[in-house]
Amino acid sequence: MGEQQTPLDAFQTHMNRCMAAVLAPMRRPDIRVTIIVRAPEALPEEAMISTNDDLSVVRDAVVHFAERSNG
């Protein structure tokens, strides 16, 4: 029998399926998708990030947004 997934692992699997569904109709290998899920009260480091690109791009985008938001 297979191992039980933790709720976090199951959610990550779900996010990966969501990315695949977004990418499928585009049929281009260079398309990049990043999904960031975060509760309004959560800290930025508590975000769930799923991406088929380099995570440094996501990090830089979050840092840029935080800097602009804090004025």
Image (spheres, grey):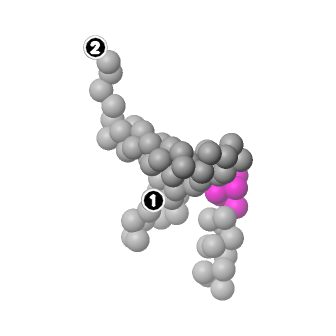
Residue identifier under label 2: 1
**Disc number for residue 37:** 1
Whether residue 3 is visible here, answered yes or no, is yes
Q: Residue at x 51, y 58 (%)?
A: 36
Measured along the vertical axis of the image, is residue 65 above or below residue 30? below
As shown in the figure, which amino acid type bears the numbered disc 1? Val
Q: Quadrant of the N terminus?
A: top left
Mark 2 burial class by Cα count in 10 Å: few <14, some 14-19, many 20+: few
Mark 1 burial class by Cα count in 10 Å: few <14, some 14-19, many 20+: some
Spot occupied by residue 19 in the image (x, y as percentages of width and height): 51, 48
Mark 1 lies on a secondary structure that is: strand
Spot occupied by residue 2 in the image (x, y as percentages of width and height): 32, 18
Measured along the vertical axis of the image, is residue 41 above or below residue 3? below
**What count of labels does the image hold?**
2
Horizontal arrangement in the rendering, residue 26 relative to residue 64 (left or right): left
Q: Quadrant of the C terminus?
A: bottom right
Indicate the quadrant where residue 59 lies.
Answer: bottom right
**56 within the magenta span:** yes
Whether residue 55 is visible here, answered yes or no, is no
Horizontal arrangement in the rendering, residue 17 relative to residue 59 (left or right): left
Q: Magenta segment, which residues? A: 55-60
Residue sitting nearer the eye, 49 or 31 = 31
Indicate the quadrant where residue 69 lies.
Answer: bottom right
Spot occupied by residue 63 in the image (x, y as percentages of width and height): 66, 66
Q: Residue at x 67, y 76 (%)?
A: 67
Measured along the vertical axis of the image, is residue 2 above or below residue 54? above
Mark 2 lies on a secondary structure that is: loop
Q: Residue at x 68, y 70 (%)?
A: 64
As shown in the figure, which amino acid type bears the numbered disc 2? Met
